[in-house]
Amino acid sequence: MLDQLEDRLTQSLAGTPHLKPDEQRRYLGTFRERVSLTLTYDQAQSDFYLARLKDEMLAHPDYQLAIRSDLNETPLNKLLSFASQHELKTVLKADEASQNPSPYVLVLASPSQALHVEVIDVAEKYPQEVTPQTKTSHPSFWQKLFD
């Protein structure tokens, strides 16, 4: 009886125990196994990566997009309007742990099923194709002289 009372008091003071709290903090409230795609703050500023995220959201309308609350207004407004137009689920998350913030500002994940996706970083999953710039060579003085 005394042990139950002590457990109840401890739970009331510390809150209910969470399964893998660091992992949930890192992936904005969900587990790694449920995550389909992640974006860092710098990646969220890129229109290319936001377009890939939108494609992924349309491909999986049952997934949920978790957005960290400190994202800039421009990408945040774009994503919220896109999600409302297509009736997609979004959740705005406050970064609870200021000492150990999540590196991700956007996490697309299944709310209830494990996906076990190997590559979740948007830059690895959708690499940008860098087109080599062809340098137009101007003939040198000597080439002009002897041609």
Image (cartoon, grey):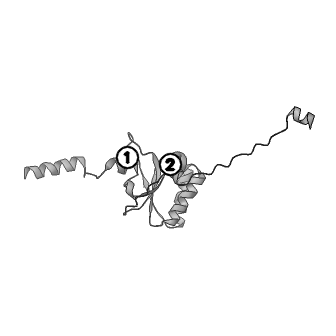
Instruction: Please say if 147 is above or below 75.
Output: above
Where residue 96 is drawn, which disc sits there? Answer: 1
Q: Is residue 97 visible?
A: yes
Residue 144 falls in which quadrant of the image? Answer: top right
Instruction: Please say if 134 is above or below 66.
Output: above
| Callout 2: SS | loop
Disc 2 target residue: 71
Q: Is residue 81 visible?
A: no
Q: Where does residue 35 sit, x and y in percent of width and height? A: 42, 57
Other residues around mark 2 within 10 Å, as few (<14) / some (14–19) / many (≥20): some
Q: Where does residue 57 sit, x and y in percent of width and height? A: 50, 62
Q: Spot the residue most to the front.
A: 146
Residue located 55% across and 55% down the image = 77
The amino acid type of the residue labelled 1 equals Glu
| Callout 1: SS | loop
Toward the viewer: 118 or 32?
118
Residue located 83% across and 39% down the image = 138
Q: What distance separates the C-alpha of mark 1 from that of mark 2?
A: 15 Å
Q: Spot the residue most to the top.
A: 142
Toward the viewer: 121 or 139?
139
Q: Where does residue 127 sit, x and y in percent of width and height? A: 57, 52
Q: Spot the residue most to the left.
A: 1
Q: Which mark sits nearer the N-terminus, 1 or 2?
A: 2
Residue located 41% across and 49% down the image = 94
The amino acid type of the residue labelled 2 equals Leu
- Left or right: 80 with respect to 139? left
Other residues around mark 1 within 10 Å, as few (<14) / some (14–19) / many (≥20): few
Residue located 44% across and 66% down the image = 62
Q: Are marks 1 and 2 in contact (CB under 8 Å)?
A: no
